[in-house]
Structure formats: C-alpha cells, structure tokens
Image (cartoon, helix red, strand yellow):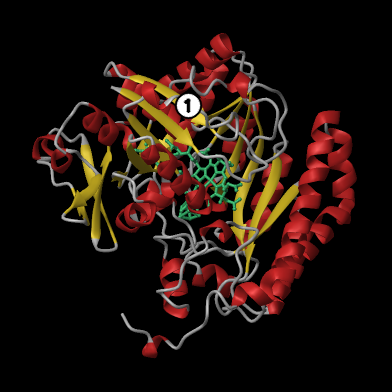
C-alpha cells in the first residue's frame, strides 16, 4: 500500500526530526509499503491524492486542531485516514469523533499501521479504534500468542487497557532518510541551544513508572520501562555520524538515567569506540537519579547539557503533584551537575491547583539562586489522560468545547491556584526576566552562542514575553469559554 504520514504545520519555534513518524515509516517499509513523511514544520503539506491509499496524521493536544484540518483535506480527496500520536493515545474515541477520521491508533503505531496496511479486518488490528454503527469501537484481536511469547505487556490506564511492545529493538532504527537531520537545520532544536548541527533526536528507552499528575509520558509510553540494547543505541549513533554527518545527538527519553546500568553501558560504549559526539538530555532527568560518578562518566562520553525536572521549590506542591522528590536534594544535585562541567537547565512549573502566590514566588526565587545555566518557567497544563486533566474537567464544564490550541506550557490559563490567569502570566514573565538578569546569565549565554543562535534566542525570549502578555490581554474574553461550575450541579 502507499501510505502518506503527516505531521501538521503548527506554530512552533522548535523544529526537529519527528521520531514517531520515522519509526512508523521504517516499520511500514520493512513490510514492503511505499511511505512518505511530510512534516509541516519542514515543508508545505502538498501532495497528489492519486499517489496515496492511506493518510496518517500525528498530533499532540496543542496542534490537534491542525491535525483535524489535515484529516478533513485527505477525506475530501476520498482517501482513508488514520490519526495517532500523544493526543490520540490519551483519548482515542473522542479524538476519532472530533476529527471524523476513519481510524485512530490507541497506542504505539508500528503494529497498528502495519496490520491495517496489510489489509487485516479493522476489528482484528491491534490498538485500533474504528467506526461501527456510527460509534467508535475498539478492535479486539486475539493477542494471546503475543503475550505468551512475552512480546507485549498491558498497562491499565483509567478504565482502559493499553498494549505495548516489550522489545524495542524489534522496531529497529527510525527511517532516517525520511526525517533526515540535514533537512532540519534552519531553526531550533529542543532546548534551543545546541553545540553543532546536524543534530538528531534519539530514544533509548520508552516508558516511565512515576505518576506525576501533570505528565502524560506514562500514558503515551506506558508505565513499564523498556530499554534498547545499549550496543545497538551506540551503533545507531555511529551510523548517524557516518551516513548523515550528525554532530550532536539529543536523547529524548523520559527517564534516561532511571536504570543506572543502562546509562553507564551507553556511556562506556561511546568511550570504548572513541566516538566524538556532543549529546544532551533536553527532555529532563530526575534529580534523584544522578550521582557524581555517573555525571563524570556522562561528561566523558560527550554529555554537555541536561534538563532537570525540579518543578517546584515547595514541598507541599511537590507532594501534591506526586513528584516523589525531596526538595533538599535539588541544590546539591544541581551543584554536582555544574561541578561535572555539564550545563544544567531547570524545569519549573507554576499555577498548580491551590498553589499560592507566595509558593510560586518561592519557586522563582529558588530557581534564581541555583547554579543553573538556564531555566524554563511553564504553566501547569492539564494534558489529557493525566490526573490534573481529571481535576480540570471536574472544575470546568465538561460539555464546553475545549480550545486545544492553548494546551501548551505558555498559553494555558486557569484560575484554580490562588492567582488569576493574568497574575500567573505576569509571574511567568517575571520569572524569566529575574532568572536571566541575575548572575549575568543572559550575557553569559549571548557570549557563548554563535551569531545565528543569538538571533533565534532573542526572538524566542521576545516571543515568550509577548505570548504571555498577549494572552494576558485576551484573558477576560477567554475566561468565559471555560466557566467554573459547581461539580455537584454538573450533569454527567
Ligand atoms: C521530543 C518531544 C518533543 C519535540 C518534538 C516532538 C515530535 N516532533 O514528535 C518538541 C520539542 C518539538 C516538543 C514540543 C512540545 N511537546 Co513534546 N515531547 C517530546 C517527547 C519527549 C518525545 C517524543 C518522541 O519522540 N517519542 C518517541 C516516539 C517514538 O513516540 P511518538 O512520537 O509518541 O510516536 C509514537 C506514537 O505516538 C504513535 N504515533 C505518533 N504519530 C502517529 C501517527 C499515526 C498515523 C499513527 C497511527 C500513530 C502515531 O506511534 C509512534 C511510534 O510508536 C515526548 C515524551 C514522550 N514520552 O513521548 C513529549 C510530549 C510528546 N510532548 C508533549 C508536550 C506537552 C509538548 C509541548 C506542548 C510542550 C510545550 N512547549 O508547551 C510542545 C508542543 C509543540 C509546540 N507548540 O512547541 C507531551 C504531549 C502530551 C499531549 N497530550 O499532547 C509529551 C507526551 C510529554 C509529556 N511529558 O507529557 N516535544
Ligand atoms: S515528569 Fe518525569 S518522572 Fe514524572 S511522570 Fe513524567 S516522565 Fe515520569
């Protein structure tokens, strides 16, 4: 079959190869299908409908509206459509209804898409939602043999079960030809700052066993950690260097250092093979999963930057969001990262339910006082599938149309903390200003950047400030979209 995979065009300052579509493409090609990836952040979404049988569209929540438009366009050409990606995994039935696509993938798409493309009956395709009598229906294939062979495991999320592939190496490498890192050189990678281009994101594990109430990683990637073979990971890095001229790698795992032996094995393999590569961890690692010896080894293997999931300076908030982190550990660990010669980026969130203005300021002041090179202050955002989302639904009207575009860390607005959305936006801007203006951080960054990066960096800072301020002005109108209702009077 001929399958076109699309990542929609949406508003993003970060443009990086789409790993998810790369993995789907390689699996489909392995089974003899013709595949093309169109990434809206890299190129225009233009295609000849005659060339394709199925169009697959990917979406995070914040660009789900764009996904729906691409589905509508493909359907207008008479093509079959399937949607997948983090937003869809979190609520596949509703996503199918909202988008009116023909199918939705309720989990990792590799098996689902290959089985659908091979002509299997929708009811027999793993992880598929399809239409039956005008309603979304979950497929129900016989998975017994796969479970017996220990190829899959099931996680229960809410009242639904999701199946995940155990052996990640079965997926092989993503189809790098279709997401060639050399074709993503014009804008910024994850984390904004890099050492060298071309740059490629990779993933060495999938899953996260924690349950932080704002994070959807355990839902989209499963609660059980699955690891790639460290030797194969390093083979992949070598191939990227040789074939695609890659000079930097970004490891996008949710929990790269969770199992120490995995991290050590990858570092030792890089060192053993004398591979010269810069690498970073822009997605964040846990503070309690680092130690001085590990950091030293990581640095030796080429790690120059890592993001740290700190979130709050207040133990009450850390406990409320189920971070399972002791605040006292933060300062010590940040110092250790700094001492190891690795740049440290702190992730912080403000605006959690019941959070007071004092607690938010405490977080910002704490961030400024740490040995951090950069910091990111984001708004607590209830991503679908998370506990925070359930709390949000409970507080706001369920039947209101949700404005998914605002479901990102800069534009989301809520009044469930002590502060109004306007005050949170102001605190966010104040946090960025205070952090970068203390300890000469802004100047230090400017002097460390190449010219091209300086322009992009400044543009980004201005955009963050404008975004928060602009939304500030729109709040009065927007707040009326989500009217607070007393849960006891809500019709279920
Ligand atoms: C790298 C990354 C990014 C990159 C690029 C992602 C990309 N192009 O794919 C960048 C930095 C741009 C990014 C940005 C954001 N991200 Co992000 N990101 C990730 C991260 C860490 C890894 C993604 C990845 O490569 N995973 C590995 C691949 C193999 O998985 P995958 O992409 O999900 O694809 C699989 C399935 O989803 C499915 N699938 C995907 N597409 C399709 C399509 C079809 C047709 C089918 C059938 C199946 C299918 O099959 C794929 C293969 O198994 C994830 C965390 C995670 N664990 O996934 C968060 C994550 C996806 N991001 C998230 C968020 C919230 C954001 C932001 C909104 C944050 C913000 N700044 O406000 C922004 C949005 C963009 C913007 N406006 O700037 C959330 C999404 C939740 C949601 N419900 O949408 C996640 C899950 C993180 C989290 N902790 O909750 N992100
Ligand atoms: S924030 Fe980190 S530790 Fe918490 S659930 Fe998400 S990926 Fe796991």
Q: Is residue 422 left or right of residue 242?
A: right
**Vertical side of 212 occupied by 190: above or below:** above
**Callout 1 secondary element:** loop
**Disc 1 target residue:** 47
Badge 1: residue crowd in 10 Å (few <14, some 14–19, many ≥20): few
Q: Is residue 384 left or right of residue 114?
A: right
Please name whichever residue, 262 or 221, is drawn nearer the observer in this view of the structure.
Answer: 221
Q: What residue do we see at 47% from left, 26% from top? A: 47
Please name whichever residue, 336 or 287, is drawn nearer the observer in this view of the structure.
Answer: 287
Q: What residue do we see at 70% from left, 39% from top? A: 192
- In the rendered image, residue 351, in percent from the top left (x then y), is placed at 62, 71
Q: What residue do we see at 23% from left, 33% from top? A: 116
Please name whichever residue, 399 or 16, is drawn nearer the observer in this view of the structure.
Answer: 399
Q: Is residue 169 left or right of residue 395?
A: left
Name the image quarter holding the N terminus. Answer: top left
The reply to whether residue 262 is visible in this rendering is no
- In the rendered image, residue 52, in percent from the top left (x then y), is placed at 36, 25
Q: Is residue 149 left or right of residue 462?
A: left
Name the image quarter holding the C terminus. Answer: bottom left
Q: Is mark 1 within 8 Å of ligand 1?
A: no
């Amino acid at each position: 079959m001929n399958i076109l995979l699309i990542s929609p065009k949406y508003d993003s300052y970060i443009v990086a190869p789409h790993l998810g579509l790369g993995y789907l493409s390689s699996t489909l090609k392995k089974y003899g299908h013709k595949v093309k990836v169109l990434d809206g952040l890299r190129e225009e979404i233009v295609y000849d409908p005659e060339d394709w049988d199925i169009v697959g569209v990917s979406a995070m929540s914040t660009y789900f509206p764009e996904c729906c438009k691409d589905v509508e366009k493909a359907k207008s050409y008479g093509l079959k459509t399937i949607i997948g990606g983090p937003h869809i995994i979190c609520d596949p039935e509703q996503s199918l209804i909202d988008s009116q696509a023909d199918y939705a993938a309720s989990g990792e798409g590799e098996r689902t898409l290959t089985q659908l493309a091979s002509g299997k009956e929708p009811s027999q395709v793993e992880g598929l939602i399809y239409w039956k009598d005008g309603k979304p229906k979950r497929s129900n294939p016989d998975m017994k043999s796969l479970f017996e062979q220990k190829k899959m495991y099931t996680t229960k999320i809410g009242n639904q079960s999701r199946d995940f592939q155990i052996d990640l190496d079965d997926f092989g490498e993503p189809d790098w030809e279709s997401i060639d890192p050399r074709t993503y050189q014009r804008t910024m990678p994850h984390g904004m700052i890099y050492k060298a281009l071309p740059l490629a994101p990779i993933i060495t594990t999938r899953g996260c066993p924690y349950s932080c109430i704002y994070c959807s990683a355990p839902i989209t990637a499963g609660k059980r950690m699955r690891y790639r073979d460290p030797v194969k990971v390093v083979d992949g890095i070598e191939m990227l260097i040789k074939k695609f001229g890659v000079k930097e790698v970004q490891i996008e795992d949710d929990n790269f250092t969770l199992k120490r032996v995995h991290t050590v094995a990858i570092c030792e393999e890089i060192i053993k093979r004398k591979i010269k590569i810069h690498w970073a961890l822009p997605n964040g690692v846990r503070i309690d999963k680092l130690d001085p010896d590990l950091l030293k080894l990581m640095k030796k293997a080429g790690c120059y930057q890592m993001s740290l999931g700190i979130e709050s300076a207040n133990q009450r908030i850390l406990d409320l969001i189920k971070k399972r982190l002791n605040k006292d550990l933060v300062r010590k660990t940040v110092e250790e990262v700094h001492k190891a010669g690795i740049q440290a980026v702190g992730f912080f969130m403000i605006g959690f339910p019941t959070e007071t203005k004092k607690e938010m300021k405490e977080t910002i002041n704490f961030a400024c006082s740490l040995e951090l090179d950069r910091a990111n202050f984001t708004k607590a955002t209830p991503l679908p599938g998370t506990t925070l989302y359930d709390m949000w639904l409970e507080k706001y009207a369920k039947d209101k149309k949700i404005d998914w575009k605002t479901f990102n860390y800069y534009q989301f607005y809520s009044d469930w903390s002590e502060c109004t959305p306007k005050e949170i936006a102001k605190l966010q801007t104040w946090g960025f200003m205070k952090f970068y203006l203390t300890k000469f951080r802004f100047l230090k960054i400017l002097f460390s950047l190449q010219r091209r990066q300086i322009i992009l960096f400044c543009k980004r800072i201005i955009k963050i400030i404008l975004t928060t301020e602009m939304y500030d002005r729109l709040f009065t109108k927007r707040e009326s979209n989500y009217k607070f209702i007393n849960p006891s009077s809500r019709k279920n």
